[in-house]
Amino acid sequence: MENEYDEKTIKYLQLLAQKYPSIQSVASEIINLRAIMNLPKGTEHYQSVTGIAGYTLVYNSHQMYLSEHEPFTTAEETVRTNSDMESRVIPFKTFQERIKIADTDDGKEIAETIADLQKLLDAYRDGTVKQGIFS
């Protein structure tokens, strides 16, 4: 059964076919993107400076916490007291389940890419787009 695509969709699929010229390359990319979706969300750091000290909001797949950085007076004092290595960690949210990339805005974009690649795969299979024309 042949899918019916409008002209705009066919042009888009042909552009996508330039990057993925075969069923194998499309299927491989879909597999890779699905694997990425299951990875834990990476850690993000948001820094703010207040006065001569500072704070960093750390947000990862397990929790959110605030890291408070103590000010230092001189480089020599910091090295002598090892104070630049110390910060107070203030946890304020722990997640019941790990956040995966699929749960993020990036995950939504990846899901849209997978859907587009699936359309290209279907177009290859039903003959709407020919494999290898653009390679």
Image (tube, helix red, strand yellow):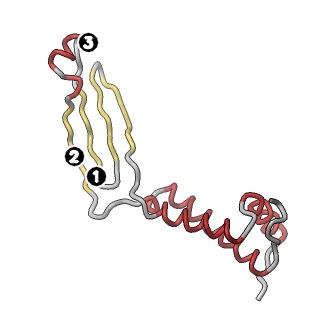
Mark linked to residue 63? 1
Residue on which disc 3 sits: 75
- Residue located at (38% from left, 37% from top): 46
Instruction: State the CA–CA distance, disc 1 to disc 2.
Output: 7 Å
Q: Is residue 102 above or below residue 6?
A: above
Mark linked to residue 48? none
Left or right of 37 in this view: 62:
left
- Classify mark 3: helix, strand or loop: helix
Counting other residues with Cα less than 10 Å from the Cα at mark 2, is it few (<14), some (14-19), or many (20 or more)? few
Instruction: State the CA–CA distance, disc 2 to disc 3.
Output: 29 Å
- Locate residue 120, reporting x and y percent: 72, 70
Left or right of 109 in this view: 11:
right
- Locate residue 88, reporting x and y percent: 19, 35
Q: Are marks 2 and 3 in contact (CB under 8 Å)?
A: no
- Residue located at (29% from left, 55% from top): 62
Kind of residue sitting beneath label 3: Ala
Q: Is residue 116 above or below residue 101?
A: below
Furthest residue toward bottom: 1
Q: Are marks 1 and 2 in contact (CB under 8 Å)?
A: yes
Kind of residue sitting beneath label 1: Gln
The front one of 76 and 48 is 76
- Locate residue 114, reporting x and y percent: 60, 66
Please identify the quarter of the rendering in which residue 127 is found. bottom right
Residue on which disc 2 sits: 91
User: Considering only order in the chain, which callout, 2 or 1, is on the residue closer to the N terminus?
Assistant: 1
State which mark lies toward you, 1 or 3.
Answer: 3
